[in-house]
Amino acid sequence: MAKSTLAFTCINCNASHKKWAGRCDTCGEWNSIKEEAPLAAGPKGKTLGASKGRKLALGDLNTVDAPLERSSIGIDEFDRVLGGGLVPASAILVAGDPGIGKSTLLLQAAAEFARTGKKVVYISGEEASSQIRMRAHRLKLTDASVKLATETNLRDILTTLEEEAPDLAIIDSIQTMWADHVDSAPGSVSQVRATAHELTTFAKRKGVSIVLVGHVTKEGQIAGPRVVEHMVDTVLYFEGERGHQFRILRAVKNRFGPSDEIGVFEMTGCGLAQVTNPSELFLSERDIQTAGSVVFAGIEGTRPLLVEIQALVAPSPLATPRRTVVGWDSARLSMVLAVLEARCGISFAGKDVYLNIAGGLRISEPAADLAVAAALISARQDIPIASDTVIFGEISLSGALRPISQAENRLKEAQKLGFTAAFTPSRMKLSSESGMDVTKYDAVDAFVEHHFGSIDEE
């Protein structure tokens, strides 16, 4: 009898190793190599070249396929993130922090989808059916015909789904599923990869849309092998701060729609309520005419979004001043501070700098550079920016302001919410400025001199 060999795989880059090591030689990630069962060589030990398979049906590039028939889930914000609705035979992975509201959102989506006459099956490996019914009663969803089950055995789940033939199946969560043909514990690399592969293949073969719930690590990455994200059609992140009532459903991969779209929800006592105008909600508690407070006109996916950027600059008693950022890239803040010192002569040495994006939202756009710079200087000089003004623009290392995309949509959203002025880069073509007073600048030093005058070192 041949001796079985152990296989070790990096969950970050999927590289194979002969033995365990603390650091992956391929990608350099630490503590990412996990033990897994080796793959079989084939039936009766034969290699793939020893037996013939079936010939594939090949098509041409000019073949006309039937258009995708999407089905509305019943929640507009969820449909927006999916690209217009649920695509049949698609596999969707939804991930988020523990307690953020993933199960609540998916239970509401299952109920709304079932109310449209579709057949929905909800299978949980983490909660008992009685616990799910308790949540459904609290959310007033008991009238929806959603079929519930509690199971972790993958073979039983696939048999049930094949006999029920639902339109939508929700598996909560993929880390608790167990395939009896894989010799490892649930949640391991082998189990997660095998169960995700079987469920995704089942979705394509039977035409069933499947939603998989995934856990995340403390670094914010989806737990398990990265190959799972490649298997599925759509990857959604459900984010938000527990101290805020806002939740963001963000698409990071979508084969059937935009990959940077967001849906905004508000956590209430009756579950998650969708927010149709997030700009108005994020600005509802904004202080009027406050130093360090600036409104940034951003773009999330196809949606223009106005958010408040707050900055605080205070003398530091420490040898190394603090640089605290919430909702923005800390490296980007360091770059903006360096440009302000090198190109504008404004030093933040000996001062603590705090930057916050109001409402728990996270921004990754370079277009927020100018708004951040304005908030920092406003807080340092204690000079407020006009409350009816929005700011956007990317700052280069030379101090020049670079043009950004979708400037007209940003201005239209700002004008709709009552803003009358905007500060933007100069090298942008605007066919229509929505009746706003737009002031353009070539470089950040011109912007600083125009609004804050000469700034002396303290």
Image (tube, helix red, strand yellow):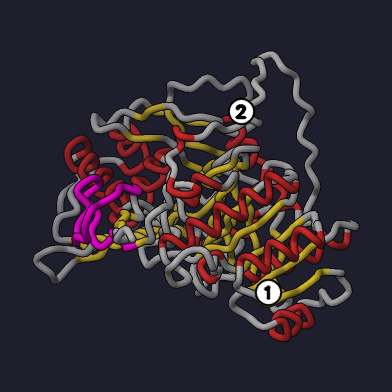
Q: Earlier in the sequence, mark 1 or mark 2?
A: 1
Q: Tell me, yes or no, if residue 85 can be seen here.
A: no
Q: Is residue 138 above or below residue 145?
A: below
In whole angstroms, how far apart are the C-alphas of marks 1 and 2? Answer: 37 Å
Q: Is residue 438 above or below residue 275?
A: above
Instruction: Name the residue beneath numbered marker 2.
Output: 433
x%, y% of residue 442?
36, 25
Quadrant of the snapshot with the C terminus: bottom left
**Quarter location, residue 356:** bottom left
Q: Secondary structure at mark 1?
A: strand
Badge nearest the viewer, 1 or 2:
1
**Few, some or many C-alpha atoms within 10 Å of disc 2 (few <14, some 14-19, many ≥20)?**
some
Quadrant of the snapshot with the N terminus: bottom left
**Quarter location, residue 233:** top right
x%, y% of residue 369?
37, 42
Query: Residue type at mark 1?
Result: Thr
* Residue 305 falls left or right of residue 188: right
Image disc number at residue 53? none
Instruction: Name the residue beneath numbered marker 1.
Output: 268
Which residue is nearer to you in this view: 10 or 139? 10
Residue drawn at x 30%, y 32% as measured from the top left: 396
Dot 1 and dot 2 residues touching (CB under 8 Å):
no
Tell whether position 258 is magenta: no
Residue drawn at x 32%, y 54% as measured from the top left: 9
Query: Residue type at mark 2?
Result: Glu
Tell whether position 17 is magenta: yes
Q: Is residue 446 above or below residue 87?
A: above
x%, y% of residue 327?
42, 57
Residue bounds of the magenta highlight: 13-35
**Few, some or many C-alpha atoms within 10 Å of disc 1 (few <14, some 14-19, many ≥20)?**
few
